[in-house]
Amino acid sequence: EALLLALLSSRQHLGFTRIISLSFHRLRATCILHCQRRIGKMHFSLPTALTFDDGPTPNVTLRLLDVLAAHKVTATFFCVGSRASMCRSIISEAYKRGHEIGSHSWSHKCFLELTDAQLYTELRRAHDCLCDIIGKPPRFMRPPFGAITQHQRNLPLQWFDYTTILWNVDS
């Protein structure tokens, strides 16, 4: 598997030109080892944001945090609330290390299949969980599968003041 990593020059994600998304479902231990060898060699001329979705996954996330720390790289972790509730210490550790924590809904349901009320419940549960863990509301939200209508895209902003973040480089 190809694993794309880039150094972040700033934590202000809205100014990034390139947003790289890596799914924990595809992130394997061998990729982390590959990442350790490659991260110092990769350079981008455009500002780049590194993001991870679908976690946390206990062993993978902890190892990944160590790799990122070794190379002084921060990232945004878009967390599934139901997983975050079971791995609170991992989310807390990522936040303490300077990583951004964003919402990836409560149960990773496709937004296109949800009513507004169901979408609100998905986001509210994740929001409350993440606020409880990191002590403040997340600023960003990424819809599962990147699937979101224009109408739905406005709702997280209205309800939670979330900026919806997609990506333009996928792993």
Image (cartoon, rainbow, N blue to C red):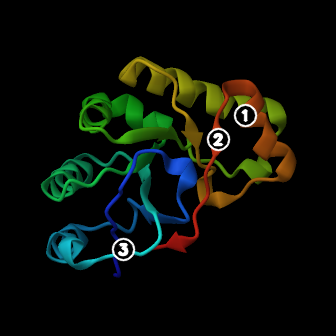
Q: Label 3 amino acid?
A: Leu
The Cα atoms of the two marked residues, 3 and 2, are separated by 23 Å
- Horizontal relation, residue 121 to residue 150: left or right: left
Q: Which residue is mark 2?
A: 163
Which badge, 3 or 2, is on the more N-terminal residue?
A: 3
Depicted 5 relative to depicted 111: above or below: below
Judge left or right: residue 81 versus residue 2.
Answer: right
- Give the residue at the far bottom of this rendering: 1
Relative vertical location of residue 55 with respect to residue 38 in this rendering, above or below: above
Dot 1: few (<14), some (14–19), or many (≥20) neighbours within 10 Å?
Answer: some
Q: Residue 108 at what x, y percent from top left?
A: 57, 47
Quadrant for the N terminus in the image: bottom left
Task: Mark yes or no: residue 15 visible.
Answer: yes
Q: CA distance from mark 2 to mark 1?
A: 6 Å
Earlier-in-chain disc, 2 versus 1: 1
Q: Which residue is mark 1?
A: 157
SS for dot 2: strand
How far is mark 3 from mark 1, CA to CA? 29 Å
25 left or right of 37 in image: right
- Residue at x-position 83% and y-position 39%: 115
Contact, CB < 8 Å: mark 3 with mark 2? no
Residue 125 numbered mark, or none: none
**Residue beneath label 3, please?**
4
Q: Amino acid at mark 1?
A: Leu
Say which of 137 and 130 sits in front: 137
